[in-house]
Image (tube, grey):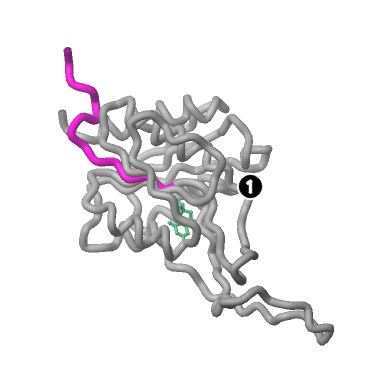
Amino acid sequence: GKPLPLSGRHVLITAGPTHEPIDPVRYIANRSSGKQGFAIAAAAAEAGARVTLVSGPVNLPTPAGVDRVDVESALEMAAAVDAALPADAAIMVAAVADWRVARSADQKLKKTGQGVPPLELTENPDILAGLAKGLRRPRLVVGFAAETQDVIRYARDKRVRKGADWIVANDVSGDVMGGDSNTIHIVTGDDVISLPEMPKEDVARVLIERIADAFPR
Ligand code: C5P
């Protein structure tokens, strides 16, 4: 039969939230479900790509034909992304925590009756920007931007600032986080492709089709 659109390509995807440890039993997290990133991984595998899915803590089954690497924190995600290179395309869908606890405790923090523990935060590395500006940059680097207003303007700024080729602007003014549908705008250097609200699986297929079109066959 005819070759699939992404046969022979390695596609690297991040998905889900990160958990930033406070101590061995506590962490800081966010509400990302991982659904959109997992749907993109499934669509990329269906399109014939070798897929590495670096996933934060989620409750989702591994899509068929996908190599999954589970991580917890942003630092672990950054290391796993690095270890997965080289890749032809990277799609960074993870909701990476902006901050981690500067010095997480080795033992469970105890109530002392003398006030609360001070939690000093420090900035996490920007995995997308690091990849896009790095020496082993994949040919196509795609980021996501979840915004509740001025989604396209913020996405354009983000595209340039992070060095991504495309930013998928995600309108999260509704109940997208954890929901089953998504409204996106694909912001490339040249234009903006706005899609109507659709199931995350359909968003994934449209995006993967566009990505396949960006590679010569
Ligand atoms: O800056 P912001 O978090 O809105 O950027 C979102 C995009 O950047 C997503 O593609 C996300 O996966 C990526 N990102 C990252 N590492 C971070 C923060 C965001 O890869 N520390």
**Residue type of the residue flagged with mark 1:** Thr
Res. 166 image quadrant: top left
Q: Which residue is drawn at 55% across and 48% down?
A: 146
Nearer to the camera, 171 or 116: 116
Q: In this view, does 63 lie above or below 72?
A: above
The answer to whether residue 192 shows anywhere in this view is yes
| Residue 107: % across, % down | 61, 76
Query: Residue 42 vs residue 171: left or right?
Result: left
Nearer to the camera, 128 or 108: 108
Marks counted in the figure total 1
Query: What span is colored magenta in the figure?
Result: 1-14
* Helix, strand or loop for disc 1: loop
Q: Residue at x 62, y 54 (%)?
A: 30
| Residue 211: % across, % down | 31, 34
| Residue 183: % across, % down | 56, 33
Is residue 4 found inside the magenta-colored segment of the image? yes
| Residue 213: % across, % down | 26, 30
Query: Residue 172 vs residue 52: left or right?
Result: right
**Dominant secondary structure (helix, strand or loop) of the stretch shown in magenta:** loop
10 Å crowding of disc 1: few (<14), some (14-19), many (20+): few
Q: Residue at x 68, y 38 (%)?
A: 174
Q: Which residue lies furthest to the right in this view?
A: 113
Q: Name the residue under label 1.
A: 148
Q: In this view, does 147 lie above or below 136?
A: above
Instruction: Name the image quarter holding the N terminus.
Output: top left
Q: Which residue is drawn at 55% across and 26% down?
A: 199
Q: Residue furthest bottom?
A: 114
The answer to whether residue 189 shows anywhere in this view is no
